[in-house]
Image: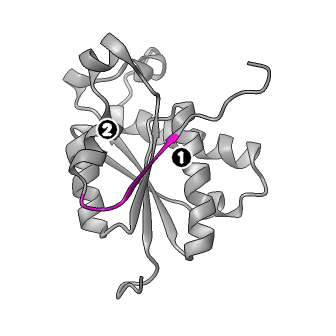
Amino acid sequence: MTKAKGKPVILVPVDFFPASQAALLKACEWAECLDARIVVLHVVHEPSDMPSYFSAVLKKKHLVRIEDAAKQMCDDFIKQLTTQYPKVGLLNKLECMLVKGIPVSRILQVADKLDAYMLVMGSKGMTGLQRLMLGSVAERVVQLCPHPVAVVKAIEEEGK
């Protein structure tokens, strides 16, 4: 597992949903064991393919570039996790990367570019018609990625 360019990389693609939080926390555990660094990746969809979770940020009176909104959301996502899990020291040492494009293809490109040791991804666990209509980014990455991919489910909230 020696890398010519330093520590191995664990790539964690995120979409800011609970499954991404679980994936990032699991990646931190594994990075500690492997003495690896973590690169958090968010793929910004092209405007014609803009997901609804950007709409709240974009409803301000002034226009916000989608990349700027995504950067702010990524910073907020990591800050929330750092506050919620202060004992996970690696959350303070994350490298963040934002790229534009179609999620599956861009995740695969970044994994190759970084020569990722592994990918850790969250999965919402859609089933039935919803999964057939929308597909699964994690499933497609598992099918196409030459690097090992771990898929993590969202953390169950207590009391549910």
Label 2 or label 1, whichever comes before in sequence order: 1
Q: What residue does disc 2 label? A: 139
The residue stretch that appears in magenta: 146-152
Q: Quadrant of the N terminus?
A: bottom left
Whether residue 157 is visible here, answered yes or no, is yes
Q: How many marks?
A: 2
Looking at the rendered structure, the secondary structure element under dot 2 is: helix
| Residue 113 in the image: above or below residue 83 | below
Q: What amino acid type should be assigned to the residue bearing mark 2?
A: Glu
Q: Residues within 10 Å of mark 2 (few under 14, many from 20)?
A: some
> Relative to 123, is 139 on the left or the right?
left
Write the residue at 44% across / 21% down.
53
Query: Can see residue 100?
Result: no
Q: Secondary structure at mark 1?
A: helix
Does the segment drawn in magenta span residue 70?
no
Which is more foreground, mark 2 or mark 1?
A: 2
Quarter placement of the C terminus: top right
Tell me the amino acid under the disc marked 1. Answer: Ala
Q: Which mark is residue 23?
A: 1
**Residue placed at 45% from the left, 42% from the top?**
14
Which quadrant of the figure has residue 62? top left
Determine if the magenta segment contains residue 147.
yes
Q: Identify the residue shown where x is 41% and y is 86%.
A: 2
- At which x and y percent is residue 65? 34, 32
State the image coordinates of residue 151 (x, y, percent, origin top left).
Answer: 45, 45
Percent from the top left, x then y, of residue 120?
45, 52
